Image (spheres, helix red, strand yellow):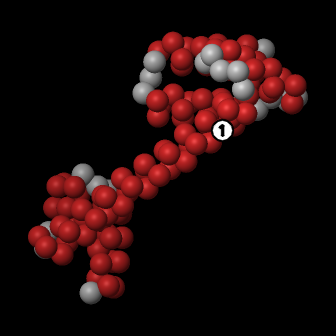
Amino acid sequence: MLLADKLRLAEVILERQLLPEKEQIIMNFLFYYVNFEFQETKITFENKINLLTKKNNTEMTIQEIIIGQEKLKAKRLALKEAKEDEITRLIRKQGLTDEQIVEFAEAPISLVKRVRKRTERIT
């Protein structure tokens, strides 16, 4: 029953043509967090996903999922670093208060305080 449900979800995900990042996150969830009791069922699931995505190699599908996860992690890290750099610039060059930075940079107050504390230690 779980196999049928996971396959149905995968079909819906693929039919909707989501953004690749969103599709990857949901497929990762299906592959890694909703587990089968038996290894044979997992292999059957992977093979059927390969057919759905028109791929021939199970290893390639898993490899693509792992690569997708790494790309998402790198993208999130880059966005976080860019946001921290923006906050640092607003602190150093503009002299804005934490509340002004939260509003201007659209960042959580906890992040602004953490960056300010780190910036003050450096200077």
Q: Is residue 76 left or right of residue 46?
A: left
Residue 12: x and y in percent read 55, 14
Q: Is residue 70 left or right of residue 77?
A: right
Residue at left 73%, top 28%?
Answer: 58
Q: Is residue 27 left or right of residue 42?
A: left
Residue at left 13%, top 73%?
Answer: 93
- The quadrant of the image that shows the N terminus is top right
Residue at left 80%, top 27%?
Answer: 42
Q: Nearer the viewer, residue 81 or 64?
A: 64
Q: Nearer the viewer, residue 8 or 73?
A: 73
Residue 122: x and y in percent read 32, 85
Residue 18: x and y in percent read 44, 23
Under tag 1, what secondary structure? helix
Q: Is residue 27 left or right of residue 83?
A: right
Q: Residues within 10 Å of mark 1 (few under 14, many from 20)?
A: few
Judge whether 72 appears above or below 8 on screen: below
- The quadrant of the image that shows the C terminus is bottom left
Tell me the residue that label 1 is attached to: 63
How many marks can you see?
A: 1
Quadrant of the image occupied by residue 10 = top right
